[in-house]
Image (tube, rainbow, N blue to C red):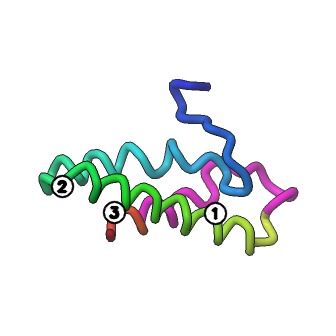
Amino acid sequence: CSTELDEGVRPTGHPGIHIVPPALARAQELGASGAETLLAIVLGYEVQARITAASRLRGRVHCHGNLGHAGAAAALAK
């Protein structure tokens, strides 16, 4: 699972695989600093965690791939 960034942070649904690669690619494209990139990744995690915690999907569907797009979009927007 380490190659999948399957970090297992709860209740976020494994956000690393959804957030980190696009955030790194965008940071490289923009020439963003490490601090800016880290902030975007943390923001993406926070967004995904809050949406996952508030949703009624938990326990009904598998957490992978359902809300990662929201966290990735937040990281990319930052």
Helix, strand, or loop for circle 1?
helix
Q: In the figure, 42 relative to 28: above or below?
A: below
**Disc 1: which residue:** 49
Q: How many marks?
A: 3
Give neighbour class at mark 1: few <14, some 14-19, many 20+ (Cα, 10 Å).
Answer: many
Q: Residues within 10 Å of mark 2 (few under 14, many from 20)?
A: few
Dominant SS type (magenta): loop
Which image quadrant for residue 35?
bottom left
Between the C-alphas of marks 1 and 3, the distance is: 16 Å
**Residue with the mark numbered 3:** 76
The tag earlier along the polypeptide, 2 or 1, is: 2
- The image position of residue 71, as x and y in percent, is 50, 62
In this rendering, position of residue 16 left or right of residue 54:
left
Q: Residue at coordinates 81% horizontally, 60% vertically from top-left?
A: 58
Q: Which residue is mark 2?
A: 32
Q: Amino acid at mark 2?
A: Ala
Q: Quadrant of the N terminus?
A: top right
Disc 3 crowd rating (10 Å Cα; few below 14, some 14-19, many 20+) is many
Quadrant of the image occupied by residue 56:
bottom right
Q: Which mark is residue 27?
A: none
Say what amino acid the circle numbered 1 marks.
Ala
Which one is closest to the eye, mark 2 or mark 3?
2
Mark 1–mark 3 CB contact (< 8 Å): no
Q: Amino acid at mark 3?
A: Leu
Magenta-span inclusion, residue 60: yes
Secondary structure category for the residue under label 2: loop
Residue 77 lies in quadrant: bottom left
Structural distance between the alpha carbons of marks 2 and 3:
12 Å
From this view, report whether residue 20 is shown above or below residue 3.
below
Q: Residue at x 46, y 58 (%)?
A: 42
Residue occupying image coordinates x 61% and y 35%: 6
